[in-house]
Image (cartoon, helix red, strand yellow):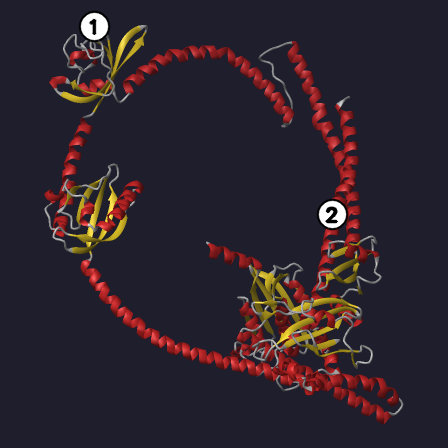
Amino acid sequence: MRLRKATILMLIGSIVALALILAAASELIIGSGFDELEVERDEQNLQRAVRLLHNEVDGIDTLVLDWSAWDAAYDFVSSHNQKFIDQNIIPATFEEQGLDFIGVFTLDGAPVYAVGVDPDTGELAPSPEGLLAKLEPGRILYPAEQDGELQPVKGLLLLEGGPFLVAVRPIVKSSGEGPAAGLLVMGKFVNQETAAGLEESLGLPLAVYRPDREMPSWAKALVQSPALTILDTTDHHAAKGYVEIKDLYGNPGLVIELLLDRDIHLQSHRTIRYFVITMVGAMLLFSALVLLFIETRVLSRMASLNRQVGKLSANPNLQTRIQLDSNDELTELAGGINSMLDKIAEARDSMYRELDARRSGELFLSQVFDAVKAGIMLVDPVEFTIQDVNSFALTLMGRTREEVVGMRCHGVVCPAEAGRCPVVDLGDRMDHSVRELIAAGGRTIPILKSVNRVQRNGKDLLLETFIDITDIRDAENALKLSEEMYRTVFRNTGAASIIVDMAGMITMANEQFEVLAGVKAEEVELRYFWMDFFPQETQRALLALQEVAQREGRAQHAMLTFRTVAGEERYVRALLAKLPGVNVCVISLQDLTEQQQTEKALRTIQQELEETVSLRTKDLRDAVEELKEMDQLKSAFLSSASHELRTPLTSVLGYAKLLKRTLRRHFWPLAKHKEELEHIVQEVETNFTTIEREGRRLTQIIDDLLDLNNIESGSMAWRDEVFNPADVLDEAAKAITPALAKKELVHLVSSYQRRLSPVRMDRLRLFQLLYNLLDNAVKFTHQGKIVLSAKEQVTGILEIRVEDSGMGIAKDEMESIFDKFYQTQSLDSLSEKPLGTGLGLTICRRIVERYGGRIWVESENGKGSTFIVRLPTVEAEKELRKLASE
């Protein structure tokens, strides 16, 4: 098949195959990628639903924690005081806290007082069916004991009345001290109101199912599988997600269904369709261009090359060359053929050049013979006459070539008698032998000589080589002089020193050693072992020390007791060092007897000083304990006072809600057609609304006081976990929406990526921090915008900013606003009264500092404020742990 036809068929087949591959690959890569992104988003929404339900449980547990550490509850377990019930466990409490059950039990599981509420009438009712049986010792709700203390229990139960969120804690005193008097239990059903709250927070349609009742088929499949989530994507336009929540037994307790959009899936199919059409069109255009290029640049020129090569093979001529235009691979191929013809022509001349090279080789060897920087002579082994000699040998002897060639070797480099040649006559092997070279005038030069038998043109010869060793002999003499000099220095050095052999024998001692030991050097050299001057119980350790110094070649130190010949003990520092290249050690001894006596006196003074410091430290410790006791009293007072304030406040808020609901149900229908009565009812409802608003404000003040007290006293329960802070940013932005709705001229702008670097902290405390900052921004901004942003400023540091266009803060107040109870002087121009407790920003700073972060404000009067929070991410924690381990 011709190349042109094969090329066209190949291009058509390639376009068809590419279209099919693109369609399949796009569906596999782009489609699956979009689907994975959609699944990831749906999974995040399902996990958000789980977290929101867990937040409901945590809210109940926080309320139980507040009530269980309360002296009034502690006394109620034993006294059964009716006043406690009348003031606290009333319909208003259930209404305000959103509870369906409150119960106080003894440690045996017997109810002291347990009551539920009727969801329709709001009146007290019997406990939920099946709940009390689960509080008996050994049952699921009874707290386990760890380190002698009962541990809290919280989670989900599946009761006859429906899924039930419950929390249990031991009842202790307000100070937190035990032993536990009983158990406090609170809980509520997951009903339509709870589902509506979850749906509002998620922004997605939501339904709740019981695993033991009728459910959709996908929900049933989820319950029957080990997975906790499942997605129904059979509908291309809308998907459904199901998440299973386990109860306290580890069994399915609740299934939540979310209705999810499939906008990402639909967009992926549109993208794939447009992409494949565009690529097929591009390939058609590209194929036409490729076919045109191959025809003009390849096929026609290959035909021309084929014709010229045919002519060359029919009539070979080394002078003929192939001609092609342009500059491409075909031209290079023609050039390669021409180059091959050139090399064939050059090969004829290569033999002539090789012959010339061999002739010049002998000349080169002759030059090397004369250039070697060692004496070389060739000697006839029969006549013992010198046949040849190099220039270096002639220069060393001070003779000319004419004088030396033909001389007998005995009178030049081997002053031996005739017939006594060491190599030929005596059969000696001369390799690096020391001999004397006889130079002009009879002068002798020491040389290092070697003799070998060689052949030259088939004739045996002796090759004698030698070098001048005059410098080596001079160096040996200088070494002897140096050894004598160092021996003199050693003898007169300022430190007591000895040289010992491997056995420990003293081979040399200097004058200072004579002074230290009280004996002459000649009396100890080669007579004493160096360890003889030390106590017998340390001699084995000294021998090991010497062996280490000799084996490792490193100096060894030791503090020792030295005994003179007269028996006097001296305290010395010994330094053992092995001399390189020889098996001997140098031992230097420094007398520290006077220094040791001085140090002993200093230690006595230091001991007296430490005793004085110890007495003063005890006084300080007693003062610190007294301050701690006062701080505990303050914490106990705040905890008790908060309970005493919160109890009547809960009743007020609950009754206000009940009265307001009663007013709307029964009085509004009567007042619709009576103008005077309608005005009175409207005024009463407004008053109830004011009571609720101010009651909630007072509740917030109490909560802030408790939070700050718990943080500063170290009793705050921190529930740290790793999570994406973008989720909490979303929750805080949604939570501030009701406050924003009251200010029509203010709007919130969120500016952050969906994927932020994860942090390790308490999710609820981060939400509290963000909500406080946003709430402040709303309070002091009357028009404009509030911007909530977050990004990773540098590696390992997450920066969160809350910016507003409000009234701003004066420079002299920017640090004071974080102090406790501080109220800014820039008061709200509408109310002219403080907007809060002065504790919100203090709590924010304590939370940030708890996690190693930093918070500050940048502001200018009249130009808004920017609160900046920097928190370390999980990556920063890893780097810190890595540095600590290194």
Badge 2 amino acid: Ile
Please state the horizontal and vertical placement of residue 378, each as a whole percent of the image: 25, 12
Instruction: Establish if 859 lies above or below 427.
Output: below
Q: Is residue 728 left or right of residue 234?
A: left
Judging by the rendered image, the residue that carries numbered circle 1 is 383
Callout 1 crowding tier (Cα within 10 Å): few <14, some 14–19, many ≥20: few
Judging by the rendered image, the residue that carries numbered circle 2 is 30
Disc on the earlier residue, 1 or 2: 2
Looking at the rendered structure, the number of numbered marks drawn on it comes to 2
Residue 355 visible to an observer of this rendering? yes
Q: Is residue 345 left or right of residue 501?
A: right
Q: Residue furthest bottom?
A: 676
* Residue 758 in which image quadrant: bottom right
Residue 244: mark: none
Instruction: Establish if 573 lies above or below 836.
Output: above
Please state the horizontal and vertical placement of residue 625, each as a whole percent of the image: 45, 78
Q: Residue at x 73, y 45 (%)?
A: 29
Residue 857 visible to an observer of this rendering? no
Question: SS for tag 1?
Answer: loop
Q: Residue at x 74, y 83 (%)?
A: 92
Q: CA distance from mark 1 to mark 2?
A: 98 Å
Instruction: Establish if 131 lies above or below 76.
Output: above
Front-most of residues 440 and 384: 384
Contact (CB < 8 A) between labels 1 and 2? no
Q: Quadrant of the N terminus?
A: top right
Badge 1 amino acid: Glu
Question: SS for tag 2?
Answer: helix
Please state the horizontal and vertical placement of residue 20, each as a whole percent of the image: 79, 38
Callout 2 crowding tier (Cα within 10 Å): few <14, some 14–19, many ≥20: some
Please state the horizontal and vertical placement of residue 812, each as a whole percent of the image: 51, 79
